[in-house]
Image (tube, coloured by chain):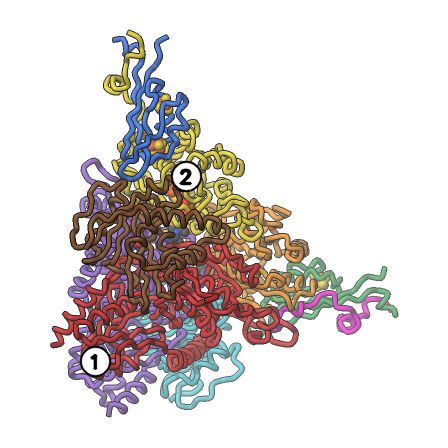
Chain colours: A blue, B green, C purple, D red, E cyan, F brown, G orange, H yellow
Amino acid sequence: MAKVRGAVVIDTEACKGCDLCVVACPTDVLKLSEQVNAKGYNPAYPANHDACTACTICALVCPDMCITVYQLKPEKAHD
Amino acid sequence: MAKVRGAVVIDTEACKGCDLCVVACPTDVLKLSEQVNAKGYNPAYPANHDACTACTICALVCPDMCITVYQLKPEKAHD
Amino acid sequence: MEDVKLMKGNEAMAEAAIRAGADAYFGYPITPQSEVIEYLMMEKPENRTGMQVLQAESEVAAINMVYGAAACGKRVMTSSSSPGISLKLEGISYMAGSELPCLIANVMRGGPGLGTIQPGQADYFQAVKGGGHGDYRLIVLAPSTVQEMADFVDLGFELAFKYRNPVMILSDGAIGQMMEKVFLPDQKERLTDKEVINKYGSWATTGKPESRERNIITSLNLKSEVQENHNFHLQKKYKSIEENEIRYEAIQCDDAEYIMVAFGTSARICQKVIQLGRDKGLKLGLLRPITLWPFPKQIINKLADTSKGFLSVEMNAGQMIEDVQLAVNGKAPVSHYGRMGGMIPSPSDVLVAVEKELKKIG
Amino acid sequence: MEDVKLMKGNEAMAEAAIRAGADAYFGYPITPQSEVIEYLMMEKPENRTGMQVLQAESEVAAINMVYGAAACGKRVMTSSSSPGISLKLEGISYMAGSELPCLIANVMRGGPGLGTIQPGQADYFQAVKGGGHGDYRLIVLAPSTVQEMADFVDLGFELAFKYRNPVMILSDGAIGQMMEKVFLPDQKERLTDKEVINKYGSWATTGKPESRERNIITSLNLKSEVQENHNFHLQKKYKSIEENEIRYEAIQCDDAEYIMVAFGTSARICQKVIQLGRDKGLKLGLLRPITLWPFPKQIINKLADTSKGFLSVEMNAGQMIEDVQLAVNGKAPVSHYGRMGGMIPSPSDVLVAVEKELKKIG
Amino acid sequence: MTEEIIIAGFGGQGVLSMGKILAYSGIMQDQEVSWMPSYGPEMRGGTANVTVILSDDRINSPILNEFDTAIVLNQQSMDKFESMVKPGGLLLYDPNGISHHPKRKDITIATIEAVKEATLINRKTFNMVVMGAFLKVHPIVKMDNIHRGLKKSLPERHHHLIPLNEEAIKKGMAKVQIIHKV
Amino acid sequence: MTEEIIIAGFGGQGVLSMGKILAYSGIMQDQEVSWMPSYGPEMRGGTANVTVILSDDRINSPILNEFDTAIVLNQQSMDKFESMVKPGGLLLYDPNGISHHPKRKDITIATIEAVKEATLINRKTFNMVVMGAFLKVHPIVKMDNIHRGLKKSLPERHHHLIPLNEEAIKKGMAKVQIIHKV
Amino acid sequence: MTEAVITPEEIIKRGKIVFKKTKNMLDKTLSYCPGCGHGVAHRLVMEVIEEMGITEDTIGVAPVGCSVLAYEFMNIDMQQAAHGRAPAVATGIKRVLPEKYVFTYQGDGDLAAIGTAETIHACNRGENIVIIFINNGIYGMTGGQMAPTTLQGMKSSTSPYGRVVETMGYPLKITEMVAMLPGVAYATRQAVHEAKYVRKAKRAIRKAFENQKDKKGTSIVEIVSNCNSGWKMTPVDSNKWLEENMLAYFPLGDIKK
Amino acid sequence: MTEAVITPEEIIKRGKIVFKKTKNMLDKTLSYCPGCGHGVAHRLVMEVIEEMGITEDTIGVAPVGCSVLAYEFMNIDMQQAAHGRAPAVATGIKRVLPEKYVFTYQGDGDLAAIGTAETIHACNRGENIVIIFINNGIYGMTGGQMAPTTLQGMKSSTSPYGRVVETMGYPLKITEMVAMLPGVAYATRQAVHEAKYVRKAKRAIRKAFENQKDKKGTSIVEIVSNCNSGWKMTPVDSNKWLEENMLAYFPLGDIKK
Ligand SMILES: Cc1ncc(C[n+]2csc(CCOP(=O)(O)OP(=O)(O)O)c2C)c(N)n1
Ligand SMILES: Cc1ncc(C[n+]2csc(CCOP(=O)(O)OP(=O)(O)O)c2C)c(N)n1
Ligand code: SF4
Ligand code: SF4
Ligand code: SF4
Ligand code: SF4
Ligand code: SF4
Ligand code: SF4
Ligand SMILES: [Mg+2]
Ligand SMILES: [Mg+2]
């Protein structure tokens, strides 16, 4: 079955590593990085990116508007 | 039938002639005087004093606490 | 004679606000100035010019409504009397800090506390030294006639917008309640929203078009360096006001051997004192500051070269006297005559005080 | 070493209030002084001494709670910072007018408006000239160490009750937030209700027994004559405070050729300036007013006979300088050095300013 | 010419509006005027008074402690203002409600039974009867300026009352009695 | 003797409490002390710093623009405070997170890998590792006064943590490296 | 001996007094306008205090408003509060003298306009005090300006063409609002313009003070009253108007008990 | 071609953007603590304004509180109001610019403590504005003091042993209170700590602004939010605590519509 696929871009410098997106993602795409950013936070990143469904849940709960979500519909994937 | 009898004493200098007691008295005992007091008001007085039943209604509505009400019970009247 | 009217100072101020093209008035009743809002409500200025009038739930709310409307580039006014002005001080400090123009009238009564509703001048310090917190200045106009109550409204608005600073009309219950003949100014047109944007769009919050950066009205600067720069900017502005906006009236000062300094109602009384004094051969003069801030320091300092001394006549315990002393700077003796608690000095009593001082000086 | 502690100025003030036998504290949070109420809440003084602590819904409510409790003859305190003090001014004027003792701490920040939360001294005028309406005075104590933050609490209460007048501790964010070594006073017993009645029953509203007339706490006098008499009474009291309660510290003034005048945090800085100056051979001194009102006029006037000049060093645009000028009365030049917006003057910058002034004087 | 007048009585007697009409009339003859009321809650049922000044020159103090004329409409005001009339001045009063009559000999004293006279016309014209009495004794404004003053000070909707008021003024002029003349 | 110190880093690194322990320790050896923090909302996640002065004399200005010692725990603080160390003074820092290392030659420069070392004991002892490093290079307070200072500044319920903290201090003393000495 | 021969003078001499002024009211003429409801309300509060025997233990708080001079008439210890702040002042008193009885006596401008925050927060804290709230739909003291409780269409000196709710707001039922708060033990609306209401109002005030005795929290007794001066009516007409208009919008009775 | 070979990079390149930051939010890092609900609330308001096409016609009022700096992030004309006075400031704006959209954005200390009177009277006048009310049960800005909405037993820096309702008052449901006022067109309580709540909250904010367009009166949208700093929890824990404790006392949903 052709699934809708998604991907996220996270602004790691704006991210404050609050963990809310990580907890919210229904398909466990996200994790907090071990690296710290300039402000001393461990930013989120898509550790399991292929599982992303573009559901936007992570973006909806991110207080810092760090996440952009892209969606590719199956038919598009085939054209 | 021996009635409860009442009488009122009105402090005419304190009275402001507001007419509230006059209107309130159920037995039309009170009237406003033609004379003015020192403050320029026409004070209330018991024009029809015999009709007073000591019901205290006039005193209850008087904002200036000018009215003292006396009551004589029939048995007392006869002893 | 078309526009001559007999009006209370409070009413004249209200009518003048309509005619000055004021956009809004926000106030809360308090004696002796409730006629301002009452007159406005009676006049329905929303029909005459579109001016909005609202009775706020408190003085605190009123001054903050003024803040909001003034920040939109509008001509906005409020008025109150002493205790109500105290409540407005946080808001006034905010407006000064945010550089918002507005007109605030204090029709003073005798304090402190609830005090009396009779006239007083004991809010002088509050008005000119800054009753609220922080370094700020109000331009303070002190009318002494009903005519000036009217005239200072438009003048006040003009100054407020010229400098983006709150202006205060510091009056008192006597002038507010008194009726005099007053020539009313012509109706000024209110600016349309478009005109406001053209004139004040660079700072006023009128809605941000794509074509400009957003406008922000705030007095907050979390960084001290930034706040200090803002303060330096304010102080520079105050300096330029001091250089350009001093107003006063010198009455028979030219040949005066002794000079009274008085504003508002007290100045009215002192005019009579000059007359009484000159009848007795005393060459008295009166320096009447019209702007209490900026204070007419220089002229007083100059007069100190020729005058034997100064009497600051005030309806308070001695407040303006400090500014007179600062102006005189030790050149001549400065004394104070005052009544308090709503009492108005009588011309004869002031004359007695003058004579006593003259005797002291010798 | 029992009672030596390292404490923030705010905490020291709170602890000192408990130990001074304060009966109540009413306040509203605001930086940089929220530690006062936080410390009190943490300490549970209702268990230690029975002292009541309540977070009010606003500064306006807080000062009026103080009014109510103070009118019962109790030792009551509040604290805030600049914008919050502005909101309290109506209430403060009421308390002065009703002659109620109380203690108000202003831990100043930079204004005007919301300004910054960093330290400032720009509420000097507000505190000493009367920010609220009407002729009234606060006794104003200016601590410059954490120790004084503690010490001035009991002193403040004593003065407040001695004169039945509000007392203000005028501090700033630096002293409030700073920790220093502090020796805490012993615990004073709170007065029982009975003792309060014995001591203050002649005026305090503690419930009217048959044996006395009712007590009324009010600042209202509808009749001007009565209000004026009340004002004369207040002025007489203020005069006696001016005669008896002036406090200051003269640091190396004896041989000083040039004198800085500074209070609170600024005075701390100036102590360093003396040192830097004397290292360079400049004979500098510091006059530190401890009571800002009543102001140490006389000593400054006397020092003007020997000093070449004065520099008023303040964290504002120039406020106390006026009182220095009034004291000096033209005998010597008076200048001002100030920082604003939460900036604290550095000793070296002040020294540069001093040197510039000395060069001018020649 | 400067005329300094106090009008004093109970609230509700029309003291303030009488002063206002007088002041407006002064304006009509190109004078400077001031009208300074007592104000505040004590007006409520208590006393009311107003100081009116008409002058050919700039008026300085609008507040006075002596008067050319005192118009007195109750006992309290008599007690307070009798002594404040300048020597040679005028004291006009309605004897109705006055128990202690004025004793000064250095001023002109006149009376008007204004309550009585007004009742015959319309109770509300009381103050205009007093006005008439005053103008008769001391004609500081011309009748046609009073007319214009009335017109200016009454709102449009009350202009039909002007004739009634003028009738009252005339009545006052007719009925005033000079008790003592200096 | 007067020692003027700035300790600067991120909020949450224990900067303020390190300063407090230092100040309390000063009191324990009968010195005058002052502790002046930066404060306000910028502390939230942002930077935090505290000026600590220990002196045998009365301390005048608690606010300084030059220091005997700067203890620097992030890059921002390095940028700000490197230049404010007095010639001949000390700059101590944790190289972890520092991209631009100090360049001055007229001061002593020392480093301590405090994050690393603390992680081995207990993350929360980070500041005590730094403290140890500082005291090793610049022993202005005696160890037993530090002990007493710790006791005074920690609430009773945390006293069991004192040995851990002292272990951290020792670790810091052991691991500090002098990069440059004047 | 028929009854008619007993003269009123005899009744006064020999009868028993069934109504006289409470001794908690001083012998001074009240400063209120003729017919103003403030007088009755004053009396009821003072009667309750006398009857409960708590005269020596009560501290009253007078507001800014016509009743600013309440302390001139009530023979107890009293404080005059700044406009709107009586509940805060009362809080201050009660916190330091918890065993005393404390009440505020406030007008509608005082309590429901400028004092809204203090009213709501004192009630929300359940301060163990009594609030007597005189709702006369106007600012009496300052000359008849619009109050928060001025009715729709009602004229006042700041709504000379009648209150327009769209721009001036709606008449505020603040007693209903505070009744929602858990701190409020008792909220009731009463009137004093007729004897039957006066009796009920007194019982309500009594209950409020009893609550304070029992430490139940805040009790608020709203009294819908007249302001014949502000309304520009005779006292008698104002009471009629009150009955027909005020009571229609502000219905009497207990709101919370 | 199986799906697995499409890399995220390709999706980003070829896919359509289904979520991105509204252009009404400036490209600056928010000053809030990690995980603070203020950020989501900011975004929703700005998204609604963008979507309604009213960016040029909207004036916002920032309070005193953590969101005092809202004007640093929202790319519209804004005013900063004194503590508690945002509804009065908004009234001033709306009265002189009735065709513009005006909203306040306020914390619980700001709106429900010091600003109680301004809140209630703006609502009572039915000012045609939107009030966004962030209820995080604490004073975030000043370091975690007790707010009017702090729950019973909840610790804060001024209730370090937990809120004692008897002396400190009860958690205040001010939205329920103002919902009683006829001037209020819409009062609702929402949350933003989970995606499902975020979606609903946005609809509520949209409705509030639509009401303003339709001149219906005041709309208030309460958003129950976290303050992990003040509550001294991790963001994730604070949201859990919010769900279990805050929402139990402050139930979500429309209170008046
Ligand atoms: C701070 C302040 N604002 C305004 C006033 C003026 N003022 C006095 S009483 C009052 C309102 C009185 O109305 P209300 O509370 O309804 O009492 P009432 O006179 O009707 O009994 C006002 C606005 C004041 N004294 N203080
Ligand atoms: C007049 C005044 N009082 C107090 C303060 C201090 N202050 C700043 S924000 C705040 C409370 C913030 O709490 P809240 O409104 O709940 O907003 P949050 O920070 O929780 O979002 C206080 C008391 C102030 N700035 N001005
Ligand atoms: S869009 Fe949905 S699936 Fe993709 S990372 Fe975000 S929450 Fe997870
Ligand atoms: S929710 Fe946003 S800020 Fe928080 S970790 Fe995820 S991306 Fe970063
Ligand atoms: S007591 Fe009753 S009957 Fe007698 S006068 Fe009064 S109201 Fe009338
Ligand atoms: S009610 Fe009282 S004041 Fe009014 S007329 Fe009767 S007695 Fe006089
Ligand atoms: S003005 Fe109104 S409320 Fe005040 S005393 Fe007169 S009638 Fe009563
Ligand atoms: S303190 Fe609380 S409300 Fe403020 S930004 Fe941090 S988490 Fe948010
Ligand atoms: Mg009222
Ligand atoms: Mg909050």
Residue assigned mark 2: H217
Read off the chain for label 1: D
Residue type pointed to by label 2: Gly
Residue at image position (33%, 18%) is: A50
SS class, disc 2:
loop
Read off the chain for label 2: H
Residue C361: image location, x then y, percent: 24, 90
Q: Respond yes or no on whether mark 1 lies under 8 Å from ligand 2.
A: no
Question: How many discs mark residues in the rendered view?
Answer: 2
User: For the magenta stretch, what is the residue range?
Assistant: G1-28
Quadrant for ligand 6 reads bottom right
Picture disc at residue H64:
none
Tell me: C325 left or right of D240.
Answer: left
The quadrant of the rendering that contains the C terminus of chain D is: bottom left
Mark 2: few, some, or many residues within 10 Å (few <14, many ≥20)? many
Look at discs 2 and 1 and give the one toward the viewer: 1
Tell me: H236 left or right of C305.
Answer: right
Q: Are marks 2 and 1 in contact (CB under 8 Å)?
A: no
Residue D297: image location, x then y, percent: 30, 79
Q: Is residue G19 magenta?
A: yes
Tell me, yes or no, if residue G89 can be seen here: yes
Res. H35 image quadrant: top left
Residue type pointed to by label 1: Ser
Q: Work out whether C43 lies above or below F61.
A: above
Residue D239: image location, x then y, percent: 39, 80
Picture disc at residue D307:
1
Q: Is residue D277 magenta?
A: no
Residue at image position (16%, 65%) is: C243
